Image: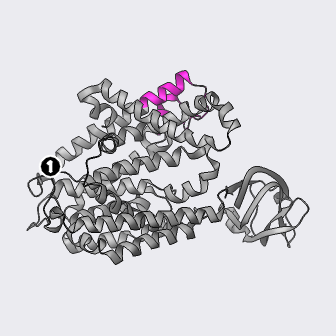
Amino acid sequence: SGSFKTDFPGFSAISCQLVSPCPSGSGPWKFELCTSGGDRVAASAVQMPALLKETPVKIRFSERKAGEWRLIIRNSSPIPASCRDLRLKCILYAGTLPVSRYWYGILAFGVFFIVIGYLDHVFRKNDDRLSRGRRADFDFGIHYFRAFAIFFIMILHYHYFCPELRVLNNTLFSSASYFFVFISGYLFYYLTHGFAAEWHFSGTVPFLKIRTVSGKFSITDYYRKKLLNILLPYFLFSSAIFLYVLLYSDTTQFVPAVPGIWKDFFFRLRTGAVQGPYWYIYFISKVFLVSPLLLFLPRKSFIAVTAASCVLPFIFTRVQSHFSYFLPMYLLGMAYARFRLSADRFLYRPAVRIAVILLTAAGLIFYYPGTEEQTGLVYVIRLLMTIDLMYLTSFLSRWRIPWLSYCADVSFTFFFIHDFVFAYVSGPVWKLFYGIFKAVPGLEIIIPAILIAVTILTAAALKILFGRFSRRFIGS
């Protein structure tokens, strides 16, 4: 058994994972959460082979308040001597937002999107561009979607100073990378084929002789642009951050992953480990590598591949395989661009709008509080939220919003620098305003807003500094 003490408002689950060796065959183990007086409040049983595979044991219960608690591990069978020094890594899942307030938040979410959906429905009746199916010169709906996607990612990573909002933040924004993946898939097909256009080809054409598709797409230009506009900024930012941390910072986050500075750098560069969010570049590079092959798929084959891929998030977690976990959303983005006219006729029906919004709210409520291992559920919720955000950005696309358009334009720069800003700006901000935060509890919620503002200003300064070469050096 072991005791622990919590001083934050509450927690609703505890996850335990074995970190010391223990032989199998010891029978079922029972994990009990008790008060300091020994009263049991929750329990969970697990077989030892599961522990040998380092599978976390998660115990859920109604929210518990701050205080002293005791975790007791029992076994009815004799415990081998080699297993009596059992060491566990335990993680508490905070549930600091009262359930009633959480319901109010989800209710407000539903009402907001229903109102937006109704207004969008009214406007769309007179929207000649969509009703006649012509291609717009610029898709402001998806453009604004990029701005919302990067804001969601920054909010997710900047929430650590706001424990009261931690549960709600994780529920709404965890795996927000899904939105960027969807946009990437959409833009890939949209920019190569036009608005909801169908590509037809006859005969078998060797891959290396393909130069254009529908007269617009060049494979060599495609790879060249990805190399210069994404991988080159990634290399430059990774190099600069690695050198800064190595030479000027006392942080311990760069404990060498492999022996040797250069080997360590190239290992981190290859795996996207220089900064936490950079895993996305490693993932999306593999997607970009195979994307042109998807253009060879006829209509029925493409639908079959996309539909089959949708089961992958229910099989793989994002830890096991980013590629398998996020690829379905990329294919769905391509599918939406390819069949947009038909998809919009269905998705923008009033009954479908209301159903999507209510299903999203129901999924968020079911997801609360802290079911991180249910990756299939996260996938479904993020897919529904993608449709919700398309309703919102479709409505907003009728107006030109300069600040939102600017944030969409520099979204990749935000992505590259936001984690660095959090690591090296949040501490000074906390120290500078600590007296105010201590005097006014809850005011620390402004820290994420300050960090986002610093990120925007830093990106603007970099864009001015590099001028017309900014896309090559900072990604936008």
Question: Vertical placement of 36 versus 462: above or below?
Answer: below
Of 465 and 202, the residue lying toward us: 465
Look at 54% across and 61% down and name the residue there.
105
Check disc 1 and give the amino acid type.
Ser
Residue 117, image x, y percentages = 35, 66
Figure quadrant of residue 393 = bottom left
Query: Where residue 119 sits in the image (x, y, percent)?
Result: 32, 65
Q: Per the image, is 245 magenta?
A: yes
What SS does tag 1 mark? loop
Quarter of the picture containing the N terminus is bottom right
Horizontal and vertical percent for residue 375? 51, 65
What residue span does the magenta drawing correspond to? 239-268
Asked if residue 273 is among those painted magenta in the image, a careful observer would answer no
Residue 96 or residue 459, whichever sits in front: 96
| Residue projecting furthest to the right | 37
The residue that appears at 85% across and 72% down in the rendered structure is 77
Q: Tell whether 199 sits left or right of 287.
A: left
| Residue extending farthest bottom | 351
Q: Taking the image as drawn, is residue 139 in sight?
A: yes
Our reading of the magenta stretch's main secondary structure is helix
Q: Is residue 25 rendered to the left or right of residue 170?
A: right
The image quadrant of residue 27 is bottom right
